[in-house]
Amino acid sequence: MAFGAFNHHRQKEAMADINVTPMVDVMLVLLVIFILSAPMFTNAVSLDLPKAKAAAVQQGGATVTVAIDAAGTVYWNEQALKGDELAQRLAAAAQRDPQPELQLRADRATRYEAVAQLMAAAQAQGLTKLVFVTDPKEPK
């Protein structure tokens, strides 16, 4: 803020204008910083997800049970699969009319990546009915 001139011989009265350019520059820099840093704050949330309780659903039609244990082994109707068998069985199930309901059972210690890959494989083969099976009993 300036209240007078450097050369007091030319301008004898006080200057009444406020130079807001530096303030606007600082505000624009802060705005850019906040815009760039805002997405980083959304992934820093620590979640403790609750347990789900739901009533049993009436089954109407064919179902296929796919289970994943903690080691990542995939089971198709309680039969262990090896190699590329999962993709073949998913493709065969997708061709049936009507499509069977794919019931996914995953161990508590199963990596999320294994579950996500199985869901992606089912979607890639064209299966549209996918349900998650949970244990309704409370742990003691």
Image (cartoon, rainbow, N blue to C red):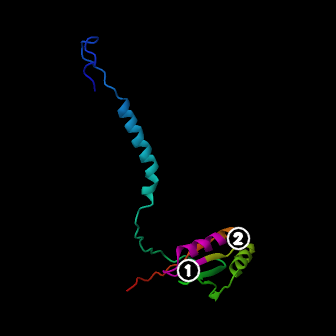
What residue sits right under mark 1 in the picture?
A: 105
What residue sits right under mark 2 in the picture?
A: 125
Residue 59 visible in the picture: no
Residue 126: where, in percent of width, then height? 70, 68
Q: Within the magenta stretch, is there residue 77?
A: no
Q: Amino acid at mark 1?
A: Arg
| N-terminal-most mark, 2 or 1 | 1
Q: Amino acid at mark 2?
A: Gln
Looking at the image, residue 56 lies above or below residue 45: below
Residue at image point 24% right, 12% down? 12
- The answer to the question of whether label 2 and label 1 lie on touching residues, with beta carbons closer than 8 A, is no
Task: Give the position of the C terminus as an image quadrant.
Answer: bottom left
Looking at the image, residue 81 lies above or below residue 112: below
Q: Give the SS element for disc 1.
A: strand
Magenta region: which residues?
103-121
Task: Tell me if 81 is positioned left or right of 20 in this view.
Answer: right
Residue at image point 28% right, 27% down? 1
Q: Give the SS element for disc 2.
A: helix
